[in-house]
Amino acid sequence: MSGSNDIGQWYKTVALHIVNAGQLLLYIYPIIKHFEIWRLLTAVLVHRLGLKYLVKLYFLYEYSSRLETSTFNDRPADYVFCLTFLWLCNIIVGFILPMPGLMVSMVMCVVYIWCQLNKEVIMSFWFGTQFKAMYMPWVILLVNWIVNGSFQEDFCGIVIGHLYYFLVFKYPRDFDGVRLLQTPKFLYRYFPNKRRSTSGFGTAPINRRQQSENTENTTVHNQQVFGGRGHVLGTR
């Protein structure tokens, strides 16, 4: 019994104090003054230990995996750029507000993008409630507001996630515009695209203009399959 207590005491006094959590958060002064640039990365991964932290890790892994194996299937460069863009936007917002811990916001970005690409998927939540995926980020925000009394980080994640979704998917699809956010070409050298395969949930929306043109071309082609001048029966 004494040995067990010694191990527990050692864990509490050593393992939990190897790194001060304050050294991992996003504070501009130590980054500039002491060049602690690791804060730019650790700020999106740090959260108070506990059940909430495990839930955030689960959401990040689950929905990140869904995006990687669906919308970004066999396109690692595009997915790396997506995460990089979300990370940079979170860092900028974190400096402006300020918001030293960015994990909640980063997780919400990923969840929001997946939900917008799968709007009609029915999601199950607490107490058997069901709703479409497009509403899920707002449900999470509302629950966190009720439980924690704050929704700032969740709302920032929704805004940043919508910014990426609008620039990459919504604007080219709904407004017939060019894709405003392009993956840098050098990323394809390090993360080359693989052979495309059939994907599941989260397939990127089809451009409406392209779909209309394809339909029109198909119609014209079908009309010309049996081309030539027609003759009324009984006439030369």
Image (cartoon, rainbow, N blue to C red):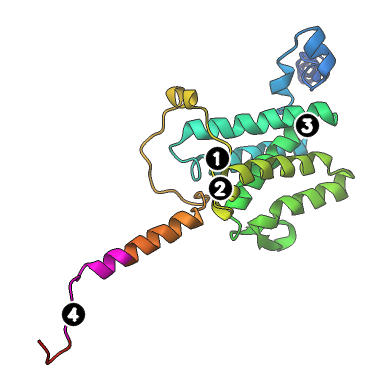
Tell me which numbered mark, 4 or 3, is placed earlier along the sequence. 3
Q: Secondary structure at mark 4?
A: loop
Q: Which residue is mark 3?
A: 93
Q: Which of the pair 210/192 is nearer the observer?
A: 210
Horizontal side of 82 relative to 99 (left or right) equals: left
Q: Please tell me whether residue 178 is drawn above or below residue 208 in the rendered image.
A: above
Q: Determine whether label 1 and label 4 are within 8 Å by CB.
A: no
Q: Amino acid at mark 1?
A: Ser
Crowd band around label 1 with a 10 angstrom C-alpha radius: few (<14), some (14–19), many (20+): some
Q: Amino acid at mark 4?
A: Gly
Camera-near label (1 vs 4) is 4
Q: Determine whether label 2 and label 1 are within 8 Å by CB.
A: no
Q: Is residue 228 magenta?
A: yes
Crowd band around label 4 with a 10 angstrom C-alpha radius: few (<14), some (14–19), many (20+): few
Q: Amino acid at mark 3?
A: Val
In the image, which disc is placed on residue 177? 2
Q: Which residues are magenta?
A: 220-231
In the image, which disc is placed on residue 65? 1
Relative image position of residue 192 (x, y in whole percent): 42, 28
Q: Amino acid at mark 2?
A: Gly
Relative image position of residue 45 (x, y in whole percent): 70, 28
Camera-near label (4 vs 2) is 4
Q: Which residue is mark 4?
A: 230
How far is the residue under mark 1 from the one under mark 3? 25 Å
Tell me which numbered mark, 2 or 3, is placed earlier along the sequence. 3
Tell me which numbered mark, 1 or 3, is placed earlier along the sequence. 1
Assign the N terminus to one quadrant of the image: top right
- Locate residue 220: give its quadrant: bottom left
How far is the residue under mark 1 from the one under mark 4? 57 Å
Q: Secondary structure at mark 3?
A: helix
Tell me which numbered mark, 1 or 4, is placed earlier along the sequence. 1
